[in-house]
Image: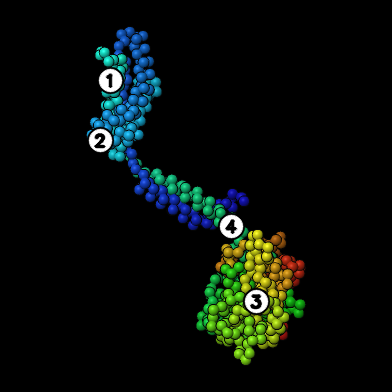
Amino acid sequence: MPFNEYVRTAVHYWWAVVASVLVGGLVGFGYGMYFTSVDYVSTARLFVTAEGGTSVGESYQNNLFAEGRVNSYAQIATSEQVATRASQALEGAIGPADLQSQTTALPVEDTVILTISVSGPSPQRAQSYASAVAQQTVEVVQELETSRRGGTSAASAVLYDEPGLPAPAGAPWMLWTGIGVGAGLVVGVVVALLLGWRRRGTVVDEATAVDSTHHPVLAVLSPHPVSVEAIGGGESVDPDADALRGLHNLIRFLGGRRNEQDRAPRVIGFTGVGPEARAADIAARFASTVAATGNTVLLVDGDLSGGGLTAGAEISADHGLSTVLTGSAGSVDPYVRHGALTILPAGPVPPESGALVSSPVMGSVLDELRERFDYIVIACPPMRPEKPGSTQRGTSSDSIVYSALADAMVVVVRSGTATRKALSDSVAAIELVGSVIGTVLVGGKRGPVSSPDSSVTESGADEQPVDDAVYADDTVPDENIESAPDSATGTIRATIGHSSPNGSGPAAAAGVPSDGRGR
């Protein structure tokens, strides 16, 4: 990945960087404020001299003798004996062991000067500690250098620089806050790059959806939960009503070209890549929108496993699709009318839902319903992505059956939750037996659609002129044609020349399909 791509990724996930910097700064501030102590250091200096010497030669020899003594005096200054005497001189204000650990003594190179430094919790204590250690060092040296038989000492240490009061030290929390901010910045950039790496493998916008399936993105919708009781009631307006009407038009326009009779699809299945897509909600919103245009629409909850659109609802407790397929509905009408929309709930959960959906009765039921409704919208179970190490195919068998029975399938994908591979595999599995007309992106972003075709520009529009016949046909009355969003139209133009994965070849220029009933 180029360097500028790394930069763009870090900028895209700026919130991760900012959050890491803030957390790191707060941790550093807390550590420096409450878990570190400020040490003040006071320094004293001793001058080491050797006694005697009346000539130049003797003075030189004495100077060499004093330089050699400095290193020994440094060991004496940090010895336990000096620390014990200094602690006693301080009247037990600090223990010998603590004072010894806080004392350092270093000779100045090529000199006879010894520097003694002692740290303390306050400037005054550091000064008193250093004064006591320096004074006791002078006394111990004097005792060691004096012969037991008396006389003058061969060498001595003189305190020529009294320990001073150390200046106030800088607050440690400032240093640790800076360290925390720097560490947080590094961690934030790493987290942003990891998120960007994950994002490269997931479906997040129109471009990644088209690249994964080579099918158009028919609509980009917001995640909007659906209540079964409110479906088709007309009390509330869907926030994506225009996009749903555009989805209806695009299904009619593109679906007709894939139908052998050149007719718009009437049985439309909606399935999602994983349960996070909530394809059943999209199917319900689509059916409600189409019903509001004056068409007779049946919404079928095709998930007989008990996890579908009408799961747990009162209308699905006793009768529904399962009782229709088993012939146990009797004289009770399982169809529920909600305003302009008719709903066929899933019904009681059967012992083997897969076997019931796969039975020939399902096809017969759909054939009968075609005579009663203009459109049949099936909320299919989600496609299950294949799990690593699994020997079973990672798709829902019920959705595959619905794909074979429906005129067209719409695959719903939730932005940021499904991988490109899962979407591609789901579409390929459906196209083994049926036809995928396109995808619906939930919670994603619109953007320029990239195309494998070199004739497609960045804006998603083909450089070749597109005949107006693609979007108009005299066989459909003008009042029945709803306007599709410009962005969706651009997506269709960008993908109209792609070959479908099932080998059906490039889609021809599509006229408005008609089945003679204005659909």
Dot in front, 3 or 4: 3
Mark 1 element type: helix
Name the mark on residue 352: 3
Q: Label 1, label 4: how many angstroms apart (C-alpha)?
A: 75 Å
Secondary structure found at label 3: loop
Q: Which mark is residue 198?
A: 4
Q: Secondary structure at mark 4?
A: helix
Q: Which residue is mark 2?
A: 92
Q: Residues within 10 Å of mark 3 (few under 14, many from 20)?
A: few
Q: Nearer the viewer, residue 479 or 331?
A: 331
Q: Say what secondary structure mark 2 lies in.
A: loop
Residue type at tag 1: Glu
The answer to whether one can see residue 143 in this image is yes
Disc assigned to residue 143: 1
- Residue 107: x and y in percent read 37, 24
In three-dimensional space, the C-alpha distance between marks 3 and 1, rounded to whole angstroms, equals: 102 Å
Real-space Cα separation, disc 3 to disc 2, in angstroms: 86 Å
Q: Say which quarter of the image contains residue 90.
A: top left
* Badge 4 amino acid: Arg
In the rendered image, the vertical position of residue 347 relative to residue 164, given as above or below: below
- Distance between mark 1 and mark 2 Cα atoms: 23 Å
Q: Residue at x 75, y 71 (%)?
A: 508
Category of crowding for the residue at label 2, using alpha-carbon neighbours closer than 10 angstroms: few (below 14), some (14–19), many (at least 20): few
Q: Give the x, y percent position of residue 260.
A: 76, 77
Mark 1 or mark 4: whose residue is earlier in sequence: 1
